[in-house]
Structure formats: C-alpha cells, structure tokens
Image: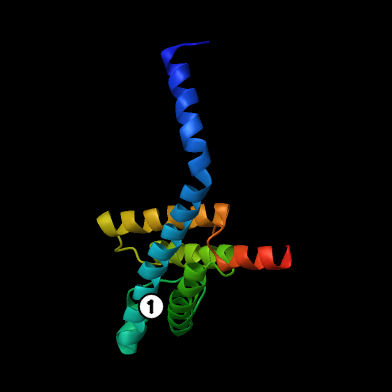
Amino acid sequence: MNSPIACLLRQSSRVITPLAPPLQDLALLALRLWLAWVFFKSGLTKIEDWNTTLFLFQEEYAVPLLPPTLAAWLGTGGELLLPVLLALGLAGRFAALGLFVLNAVAVISYPALEGTALDFHYQWGLMLFTLLACGPGRLSLDALIRRQYRL
C-alpha cells in the first residue's frame, strides 16, 4: 500500500531506527543520573539534621513493620548508597528496585504527602520501574563488566 501515511512511516523508520540504540542509552543514563541526584539529595538532608530525621520517623512517618529508628537508618542508608550504584550503573536493576521500594514506602507511610509532591513520587516510581525493566543501559558499569567478562 502506497498511502501517504505508509510512506511517511517507512521514511521515518529509516531515519529513526539507526538512532534508537544511542538515544535509548542516553535516555537511560539521564534517568539514572536524575533519580540518583533526587534520592541522594534527600539522604543528605536526612543526615544534615539527624535528630529531626529521627523525630520525623517517630512522629510523622508510619513506616510499616519497622521500628522508627531502624526505618530512619535503613531509609537514609538506602538514599545515600543506592543512588551511587544507580548513577554508576553498577547493580543497576538492584539499585532501581531498592529505590522503587523506598519511594513506595514513602508514599505509603506519609499520609500528608499529596498534590505535586505525591505526583513527583509517582513519576519517580515510573522512572525507576523503567530502569528496573530495561536495566541501566550500555553506558553503565554493568554493561562494561558484561562485555569484559563476556557475561
């Protein structure tokens, strides 16, 4: 069929298809770096005033199944370690999963989270889910290790 739409689809496919892999690599790298910055910044805020962090985990956040002090330590540790792994693309899917869980716990345990702040958490969750599904991409230490050791 030689309709204008079919012709347009064929032409655009010829142009876009060769660009898709490098664009995907850049998109995954951008997602990793952005999310790493967002979560790492949050971890830095928590260690900046540890007494306030402990207070918030005891009085404001209702983290299920964990004592507040343990939840504060685990949440803060996760927000400082996992973003570094994610940015480097080292154990990228593991880091994305860990941050996805941290993000979900934040949404569940902080009922005052609403409006734009809640929308940000949903967006971060979707971005982390994308990294979990796709992996960190070819611009990552995971990919370098796989190439080096032919895994």
Question: Is 55 drawn above or below residue 122 in the view shown?
Answer: below
Q: Residue furthest bottom?
A: 51
Q: Position of residue 150 (x, y in %)?
A: 73, 63
Q: Is residue 115 left or right of residue 57?
A: left
Amino acid type at circle 1 is Gly
Q: Position of residue 87 (x, y in %)?
A: 47, 69
Residue 41: image quadrant is bottom left
Q: Position of residue 20 (x, y in %)?
A: 50, 43
The residue lying toward the viewer, choosing from 67 and 44, is 44
- Please identify the quarter of the rendering in which residue 148 is found: bottom right
Q: Quadrant of residue 32?
A: bottom left
In which quadrant is the C terminus drawn?
bottom right
Instruction: Identify which residue is drawn at 43% across, 58% down.
Output: 31
User: What is the basis of the colouring in this image?
Assistant: rainbow
Q: Residue at x 29, y 64 (%)?
A: 112
Camera-nearest residue between 30 and 97: 30
> Circle 1: is it few (<14), some (14-19), or many (20+) Cα within 10 Å?
some
Q: Which residue is mark 1?
A: 43
Which residue occupies the extreme left position in the image? 115
